[in-house]
């Protein structure tokens, strides 16, 4: 693990040197080459901060106490999947999520923070209810502020509903609740792709200990996309393994709702298509189930937005074209403008996400590939499809870094692969190895929260 983490840190150093040398020698200062990124900390979004010593001590002591309770529960039950282990992990996640938020004071936990209000909620006064948002959103996108002109209307609608109900924190608490649910869904995802009971709980533990699911739910809505993507993946896997029609419809609905909140649905959808292809290639399913599940899920998605347009007038395609057009105009006219800038952007996307997801989590996920030949067929299909999706996303020209937050939907996949690597180490004396790995992931997350400001540039 040490050598893998060192290699990733070295790649970050090399990237930063190449980036800064290019930025100094070029007259071009658009998108990722703007001043906010031209620092010794690129490709990460944000800036370092110096917390009070008392805050550091409290957060680390709380993480140690909660981690000790989890380890004690594992030891008492005699296994990772014993009674109470999953519940103790959810307690860890909930309390650490709250503790991380409180490092910035009560406002981050109990009031909408900058990315919720300035990012999405600054336009709620322009609309009279969620129905009007759907009916007029596309026509007014060019006049909207914050994130609204490059996102679909889902977040703005929930903020509007919350405001009308006297619940201004509705979106934030929905995201927090969805993030807690993601931990449970990650455990189920691990089981469906072939991990045993121990591996599935390890996947859950790795997710709840990692930085993204603890940091971002109280600063941005993107963790919601992680949960919706998980729902779509689970539905597809159930459909591919059992032929369930209900699962296929559920997957189509999950993708529909995801699309209303973020156009990362394009990448998630690509991952689902690749998963189907890989499952067929590795003989983890049969053609009949593929055709039945895929066609029903796609039909559900198309019908959902056809009905939405008929009822409200919301045009998904027009919304997508305007959003992507705005991003291209705001960042650069052409993401493929020169080979040098394209490669810096693309490799920056990949490195920023992998490093922020956690050195321990990333290294363990990569280590799982050493066991690729002995993986269950569905896990091989899942790992292959996610790796291809990740690389395509990185080099697609659609992203301009800030992937630490935007790509959080990949984190459950990393957790599943990392858990497989840990599970392959066996049991008994290897309990200490697993606990140390989890401790490294959790400790790294604490450092990232305490010493880095994620929503300021």
Image (tube, rainbow, N blue to C red):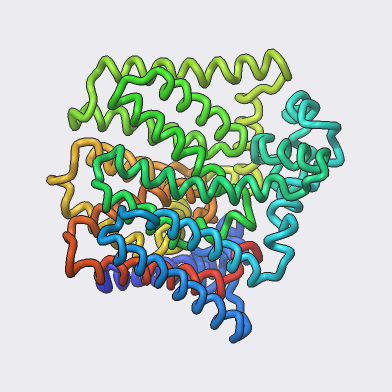
Q: Quadrant of the N terminus?
A: bottom left
Query: Which residue reaches farthest left?
Result: 373
Task: Residue 150: give x, y in percent of width and height.
Answer: 65, 40
Is residue 38 something one can see in this rendering?
yes
Query: Which residue reaches farthest bottom?
Result: 53
Task: Residue 320: give x, y in percent of width and height.
Answer: 61, 31
Q: How many marks?
A: 0
The residue shown at (36%, 42%) is: 188
Residue sitting nearer the eye, 349 or 67: 67
Position of 21 with respect to 291 (left or right) is right
Residue sitting nearer the eye, 3 or 336: 3
Position of 154 with respect to 410 (left or right) is right
Q: Quadrant of residue 306?
A: top right
Q: Quadrant of the C terminus?
A: bottom right
Classify 267 as above or below 181: above
Position of 413 with respect to 375 (left or right) is right
The residue shown at (18%, 28%) is: 283
Residue sitting nearer the eye, 322 or 308: 308
The residue shown at (82%, 44%) is: 166
Task: Residue 54: give x, y in percent of width and height.
Answer: 61, 85
Is residue 340 something one can see in this rendering?
no
The residue shown at (66%, 22%) is: 315
Q: Quadrant of residue 79?
A: bottom left
Residue sitting nearer the eye, 435 or 394: 435
Classify 186 as above or below 309: below
Classify 231 as above or below 371: above
Task: Residue 356: give x, y in percent of width and height.
Answer: 45, 62
């Amino acid at each position: 693990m040490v050598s893998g983490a060192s290699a990733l840190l070295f790649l970050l150093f090399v990237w930063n040197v190449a980036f800064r040398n290019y930025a100094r020698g070029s007259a071009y200062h658009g998108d990722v080459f703007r001043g906010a990124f031209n620092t010794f900390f690129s490709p990460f979004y944000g800036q370092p901060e110096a917390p009070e010593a008392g805050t550091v001590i409290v957060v680390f002591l709380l993480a140690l106490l909660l981690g000790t309770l989890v380890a004690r529960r594992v030891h008492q039950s005699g296994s990772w999947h014993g009674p109470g282990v999953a519940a103790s992990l959810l307690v860890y996640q909930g309390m650490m999520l709250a503790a991380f938020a409180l490092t910035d004071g009560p406002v981050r936990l109990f009031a909408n923070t900058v990315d919720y209000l300035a990012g999405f909620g600054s336009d709620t006064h322009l609309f009279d209810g969620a129905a009007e948002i759907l009916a007029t959103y596309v026509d007014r996108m060019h006049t909207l502020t914050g994130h609204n002109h490059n996102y679909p209307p889902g977040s703005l609608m929930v903020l509007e509903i919350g405001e009308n109900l006297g619940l201004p924190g509705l979106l934030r608490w929905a995201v927090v609740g969805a993030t807690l649910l993601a931990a449970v869904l990650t455990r189920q995802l691990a089981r469906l792709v072939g991990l045993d009971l121990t591996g599935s709980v390890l996947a859950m533990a790795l997710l709840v200990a990692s930085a993204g699911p603890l940091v971002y739910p109280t600063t941005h809505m993107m963790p919601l996309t992680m949960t919706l993507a998980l729902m779509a993946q689970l539905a597809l896997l159930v459909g591919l393994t059992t032929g369930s029609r209900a699962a296929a419809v559920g997957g189509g609905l999950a993708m529909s709702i995801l699309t209303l909140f973020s156009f990362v649905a394009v990448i998630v959808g690509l991952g689902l298509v690749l998963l189907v292809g890989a499952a067929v290639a590795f003989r983890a399913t049969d053609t009949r189930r593929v055709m039945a599940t895929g066609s029903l899920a796609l039909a559900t998605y198309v019908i959902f937005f056809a009905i939405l347009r008929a009822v409200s007038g919301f045009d998904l395609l027009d919304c997508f074209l305007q959003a992507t057009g705005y991003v291209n105009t705001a960042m650069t006219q052409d993401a493929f403008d020169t080979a040098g800038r394209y490669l810096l952007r693309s490799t920056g996307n990949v490195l920023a996400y992998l490093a922020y997801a956690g050195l321990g989590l990333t290294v363990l996920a990569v280590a799982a590939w050493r066991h690729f030949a002995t993986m269950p067929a569905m896990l091989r299909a899942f790992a292959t499809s996610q790796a291809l999706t990740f690389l395509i996303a990185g080099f697609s020209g659609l992203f301009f870094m800030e992937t630490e937050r935007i790509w959080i939907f990949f984190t459950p996949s990393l957790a599943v692969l990392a858990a497989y690597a840990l599970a392959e180490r066996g049991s008994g004396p290897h309990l200490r190895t697993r606990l140390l790995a989890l401790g490294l992931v959790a400790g790294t997350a604490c450092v990232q929260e305490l010493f880095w400001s994620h929503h300021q540039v």
